[in-house]
Amino acid sequence: MFENIGEMLVLFWRTVMALPMTWRQRHKVFEQFFEIGNASLLMVCILSFFIGGETALQTGPFLTERSFGGYLGGIVGYSVCRELAPILMAILIAGRIGSAMAAEIGSMRVYQEIDALRTMNINPIHYLILPRLVAIAIALPMLVLFAILVGWMGGAVVSAANNRIDIPIQAFFKNLQEVVQFRDVGNGLFKSFCFALIIGVVSCHQGLVTIGGPRGIGRSVTKAVVNSIVLIIIFDYILTRVLLK
Amino acid sequence: MSAPDPNHDGVGVEVRNLRKSFNDQEVLKDLNFKVEPGEIFVIMGPSGSGKSVLLKQIIGLDLPDEGEILINGESIQSPDVMEKYRMAMVFQSGALLNSLTVGENVGLYLAEHRLKPPEEIGRIVEKNLEIVGLKGTEEKMPSELSGGMKKRVAIARALIVEPQLILYDEPTSELDPLSAVVIGEEILKLNKRTHVTSIVVSHDRDLAFGVADRIAVIIEGAIVAIGTPDEVKANQFPEVQKFLHADIKRPNES
């Protein structure tokens, strides 16, 4: 376990050192960025709309019954932007994109494509890891920002449409505006940036250490997703503790 | 007549006291041999005898436990030696990047190192594909090619480096006899045209005796015979004879 953590830190450090090569690899970064957005945008919309809606549904009737319905916008807005959108989108992306990264790099490793790159003096970190890590580090915060906005809308629509809550959309957003500050959204985006690095590093590392045939690739994909999710949840606690006002 | 450009001649390779183990199992046992510049040197041996591991050590994909590999007298572990000499490897599976087209695969080295403008890379790719008899396949994906075509594309990709040393890992495995002959001819043509030093790892006896200037037979990680094809054929070491004359015996033949 400690050996893996060490290897991942070394991989991360080497990728950071390779950052000046990003402009040169910009086509691959755009390719990966498009891949992440294209594969995830619709799912992010659906998921975040229902996350906002469910949060409103769980808390709305309880608050309304006790005459605190006016605070619902703030509660939904705050919890979606600081916690729910960053962590749930990160888990979604770990499943969709992290698994794809581990499978692609793993199969390149198993079928000697990475060795072929090395014989051509092409650094696999510059060619494979850097574009993926940069793309996910930009894409995930953008997806999370999108998820926050759609999540708020989901909360507002459910609050207005549900008879047991019955809070107008304007009132929902008025309270949300009073409670949620830009800093809260910034905290959520910062968290998602950290989660993106975790998904990228864990998935690329699992791909690079893949051994065996198709079975090895499958094992790497599973490990990439599970390890990413475990680390995301642990780091979520640490970041929440650090970022808490 | 001007002196030959040293960058366009094959390099000499020397392997000294090379040892490699995996999980306490010794795969390469104190190997020593020399390959002359421009020579086609074939390393033969049964599967699992350590041939591919040896190739990986020569091209620097893996490090030996003991011993050293010298290219033109310079250790490959010395700084910049791998950059100084142009080396290429044709992998057993071809190892083409499946996400790239044939043309992109062949031109990858030039494109990634920005050695030529894109139009010129296109022309060089076309020329190299023509050399291996695959003109017009630039836009195909590797998945659309047969095993033999993949290996020829891998040779075209290796040629683009203008290598001074080219390593072939089982170039005829999984190929039908006709495709194997084509690959053997490609190795000979390339050697004649560019005087590249070629190290071929194979258990294909026809290929080995068809292309080799010299052959080394490696069994269980040790070289048991080395010499010209005729010298190896005449070698009386029982393991060598057994390997060279292995044949299927029908049950009714005793």
Image: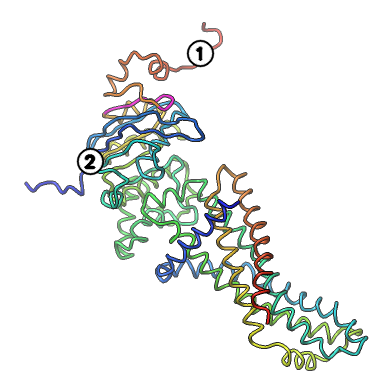
Which chain letter goes with mark 2?
Answer: B
Magenta: main secondary structure: strand
> What residue is rendered at 13% in x and 46% in y?
B4
In the rendered image, residue B219 lying in the magenta stretch gets the answer yes
Residue at x-position 50% and y-position 46%: A111
Three-letter residue code for mark 1: Lys
Counting residues from the start of the chain, the first of labels 2 and 1 encountered is 2
Q: Secondary structure at mark 1?
A: loop
Q: Quadrant of residue A136?
A: bottom right
Tally of marks: 2
- Give the magenta part as a residue range: B214-221
Residue for badge 1: B249
- Name the residue at 59% across, 48% down: A217
How is the model colour-coded? rainbow
- In percent of width and height, residue A158 lies at 82, 82
For label 2, the SS is loop
Q: Amino acid at mark 2?
A: Gly
- Reading the image, the residue beneath label 2 is B73
Q: Gap between marks 2 and 1, in whole Å? A: 47 Å
